[in-house]
Image (tube, grey):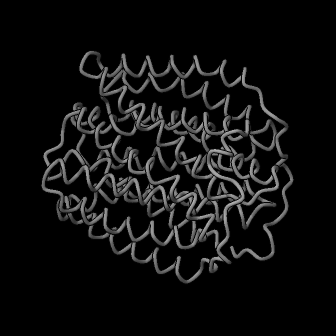
Amino acid sequence: MIAVIAFALAVDYLVYGLVIPLTPFSPAGISEHEELMILAGVCGFGALVSTPVFGYLGDRFGCRRVILAGSLTLGLATALLAWAPDFPIMIAARVLQGVSAAATWTAGLALVAEHYSRDRVRMMGFALMGSTGGSVIGPALAGGLYAIGGYRLPFYAVIAVVAASLLALIAFVPPDGRNQAPDATVFALLNDRAVLIAAFAVMLASAAWTVVETLVPVHVAQGGADPAGIGVLFTITTAIYGLSAPLVMWIVGRIGIRRTALLGAVVMALTVPMIGISTNLFAVAAATTAVQVAYALLLNPQSAAMGDAVENRGLRSYCAVYSVYNVAYTVGTIGMSILALAILPHFRLEIVLLCLGGAMMLSIPVLLAVGAPAEKSHEGSKSAQEHSDV
């Protein structure tokens, strides 16, 4: 089952990776920093509003139904992205994309956490590596197919991939069990300190990465980069993110989730400002690669921490806790989009990135002061549970 979930997450990121480099070339005529930040914000808004709903529905009626609904919604969003003639329709498409991501990630991570409790960090790492595959292929596919057939061809190709993912989910995800009331709500889980710590780390990582992935395409385009070059940049840097997953798992096994997150926050704070130094494609790629590794250190372990928090309380509300994960991620996305919209007209990009790095550094004492309960040991984990299919 892990392969099918990883593929579903990969398809979600495939569409996302497609949109980033292609948006400045859409028929909607989107080219301003402010418009790009609005699109990033409404995508996060769609995820934010729908995530708690999917968290409840997943625990009440089953995660399989939720992830199938997410796949169908992604197909509709992709079709709208291909045909959006103006900015308002593009906004609607990005909202639907956010809704589909909320369903897919909430249910997908919950399924992994529930079926692989004895090897959660490693299996979460595999799922996230799968999603990275979509991130790697998306920008390259965008650049290559754009050069062959224009703006819409990449989206047509991806619609077929979405359909394949839907069929795989139908075939290989086990049927949902008997409907039952959730044993914990999202709001109840927010009283858990371990959940709050993980949610804060997720929010911090998403806020920083929102600025980087949204503004880098326009930043390097101003330096003369074309869609193919932008696609290659994101392909290489995202591949580095995926390849860093085993390193992150190894570090977590040695120093724990909390210290790994602190390391990621420090490295990210130091490397984000480097992106704004030059518009040269190679210089930006080098800086973005460093940011990607730091992003993995900060974000990846939190998916396992969320599952551990539910299990340590003797609960099974995995969809609810991963809705907290998604809400934290989208709050970071929306919050940073709003902040960037407010300050971008008044400051150069390099100043914005420098302030972002400083803000991340200021957050490190907060992570240290909050403290954390004893972490579940993930070192030496055995194989996944027998009833799960790899």
Q: Give percent across and percent down for residue 320.
A: 62, 54
Q: Give percent across and percent down for residue 271.
A: 51, 25
When asked about the image quadrant of residue 226, the answer is top left
When asked about the image quadrant of residue 340, the answer is top left
Q: In the image as oriented, which residue stretches furthest toward the bottom?
A: 171
How many numbered marks does the figure carry? 0
Q: Looking at the picture, tell me which residue is in the foreground, 322 or 254.
A: 322
Judged left or right of residue 89, residue 41 is: right
Q: Please give the name of the residue rendered at 31% of the width and 62% of the height, measured from the top-left corner.
A: 77
Judged left or right of residue 100, residue 374 is: right
Q: Please give the name of the residue rendered at 48% of the width and 72% of the height, measured from the top-left corner.
A: 68
Q: In the image as oriented, which residue stretches furthest toward the front?
A: 181
Q: Looking at the picture, tell me which residue is in the foreground, 310 or 235.
A: 310
Q: Give percent across and percent down for residue 146.
A: 22, 58
When asked about the image quadrant of residue 233, the answer is top left
Q: Looking at the picture, tell me which residue is in the foreground, 62 or 180.
A: 180
Judged left or right of residue 302, residue 251 is: right
Q: Give percent across and percent down for residue 334.
A: 40, 37
Q: Please give the name of the residue rendered at 26% of the width and 16% of the height, measured from the top-left corner.
A: 346
Relative to 271, is 184 above or below? Answer: below
Judged left or right of residue 71, residue 262 is: right
Q: Please give the name of the residue rendered at 78% of the width and 67% of the height, measured from the top-left corner.
A: 384
Q: Looking at the picture, tell me which residue is in the foreground, 21 or 327.
A: 327
Which quadrant holds the N terminus?
Answer: bottom right
Relative to 92, is 297 above or below? Answer: above
Which quadrant holds the C terminus?
Answer: bottom right
